[in-house]
Image: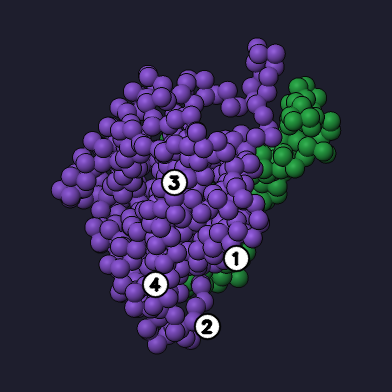
Amino acid sequence: MQKEAAIREPLILGHKTYHDVTEDVCRPIEDKAPKMWYILFGIALVIGLYGVGSILYLLGTGIGVWGLNKTIGWAWDITNFVWWVGIGHAGTLISAVLLLFRQKWRMAINRSAEAMTIFAVFMAGTFPLIHMGRLWVGYWVMPIPNQFGSLWVNFNSPLLWDVFAISTYLSVSLVFWYIGLIPDFATIRDRAKKPLAKKMYGILSFGWSGRAKHWNRFELVSLVLAGLATPLVFSVHSIVSFDFATSVIPGWHTTIFPPYFVAGAVFSGFAMVQTLLLIMRKAMGLEAYIHTKHVEYMNIVIMVTGSIVGTAYITELFISWYSGVEYESYAFINRATGPYWWAYWSMMTCNVISPQLMWIRRLRRSLLFTFFISIVVNIGMWFERYVIIVTSIHRDYIPAAWSMHFPSHIDIAVYIGTIGLFFVFFLLFARYFPVLALNEVKTILKGSGQSYKESPDYHKHH
Amino acid sequence: MSDKVLYVMYDDDEVLKNSAKQLVAKGVKISEVFSPFPIHGIDPIIGIKNTRLGIMAFLYGLTGLTLATVGMRYFMIVDWPMNIGGKPNFSYLENMLAFVPITFEFTVMCAAHGMAITYLLRNKTLPGMPAQNPDPRTTDDKFVMEIRLSENAKVTEAELDGMLQEIGYLELDKKEIK
């Protein structure tokens, strides 16, 4: 049994039993979906299909349909890629890093955060794939023996490192998530009344029976996967930042990029988790499991990573001046005062100022305020990538080549479309999957459940 | 061989653990425990050895490390050395820094997937496998001990019943296996 200080706020509110935990998590799956679910799903599906249509048009016509030009060869595509990968950093951080640090509050949120991670990385992966223009030769990024004189992919290139990093991250996160899901699927299987549901959850649960030896293996596999996924979380966004940092473009060629990008990724990922969970806990009646304390913990992570990001912005600015390199200074002066000043200052306001408000206890425990800030942070983090990518290249060394980037409607449709698809996946997840690691939550019920903590026997056990 | 199996049910993990302790002290062999979540400390009581999957993960990781190193050396140094900006790839060591990210990623990929696949195979939990828990409530809030008479030659069924009466349980189910 887990031991916990009595003065800590309980992680599970109310007087729950093991059976209540099962009931609370399984009921939304077994009941009919509320009307709101169908409405949201419909909206997300329409937007998602519009995105798919735009992608098909793009593939049929060529990436000239994007608003790129000779100077700005990379804009929304890579911005969206980095934005989605960043969002996809919270889930594995919550389930892996917090598992290693024995943070029990992660148990209420890890399942949905990880689902969000996986869907976000799906969306991220779309962009480099369609960016190839010829999607059908996408397998050329793999070192496969071929007829072109055995020409290999360039292992010196950060773009290839990205291929390996993203595919490893996606597949390992998926496996980690699914291994945790198996026992919970078994719970749903054993409760299912309808034959089709019983059959489907029977297949999904892989015949899990909860034997002691299996739990022994389960715990070790979770621990080792967490140990493997932890450096993975940090490496993936470091490698994404290498796409820029190893180039020679002023504004990109920056040694602080890896830690700065990783902090930014965690920052935006947690913001997205807040956005989704604050709605989900209400809609699915999970207020007893995901409550103010969880939100507060996440806000503290947002505050810390936001401060790292803010420090990085200011360091970057200072070094551009201190370096004495004219081009480096110009890149940053141009960002702050050039034609893209509005993007730069939106980024600064959203990412530097807003997380600092979390120092105030009342604000970081306010659900409404948290929801608002989580949206602000996600907007800010999109602008961060846009600022880094577009403002660094829109004015190059030849003033005659200077240009501006105007997104085409396909740029916008593909981006909005991925948001739609993301919500299609997430809504399906919320409807059919156990959104809470229910069997894991049961392990902390006696250590951190309100009724147990308040009972006079609680202290005798320790 | 015909066998009789006793399924002793509890509604609390701590209670099951205490009962298991008392039974084992009396020389009863408990062949299996089914629970909705891991019961910490049950393994040594019923004599389950710690899993060696961690060692396997290490070996799979080592395989990934080796494959990545050998592969990249062959692709980039031996088979098609590139000369980028007058800096040719002469040896693996000179070029190694650029290979670190992929070496790391590939090591993690092999270790994670290798271990996950081994885990599923060793558990015999694969898509479409039938559930084997004796009672559907063991994935909800009940905890079941399985005692096989064939594994407990020293005690008779009546003696076992007596012990269980004394220790206490929630439900007792007996099943003949042919």
Element at label 2: loop
Give the foreground label among 1 and 3. 3
Chain A image colour:
purple
| 3D distance between C-alphas at marks 2 and 4 | 38 Å
Dot 2 and dot 1 within a common chain: no
Chain of the residue on which disc 3 is drawn? A
Residue type, numbered disc 1: Ile
Element at label 4: helix
Residue A122 visible in image: no
Chain B image colour:
green
| 3D distance between C-alphas at marks 1 and 4 | 51 Å
Residue under label 3: A386
| 3D distance between C-alphas at marks 4 and 3 | 24 Å
Residue under label 2: A462
- Mark 2 vs 3, N-terminal side: 3
Q: Nearer the viewer, residue B45 or B175?
A: B45
Image coords of residue A345 (percent x, y): 40, 58
Residue under label 1: B45
Image coords of residue A52 (percent x, y): 32, 30
Residue under label 4: A357
Residue depicted at x 39% and y 60%: A350
- Mark 2 vs 4, N-terminal side: 4
Residue depicted at x 50% and y 66%: A307
Q: Residues within 10 Å of mark 4 (few under 14, many from 20)?
A: some
Discs 2, 4 touching: Cβ within 8 Å? no
Residue type, numbered disc 4: Leu
Give the foreground label among 2 and 3. 3
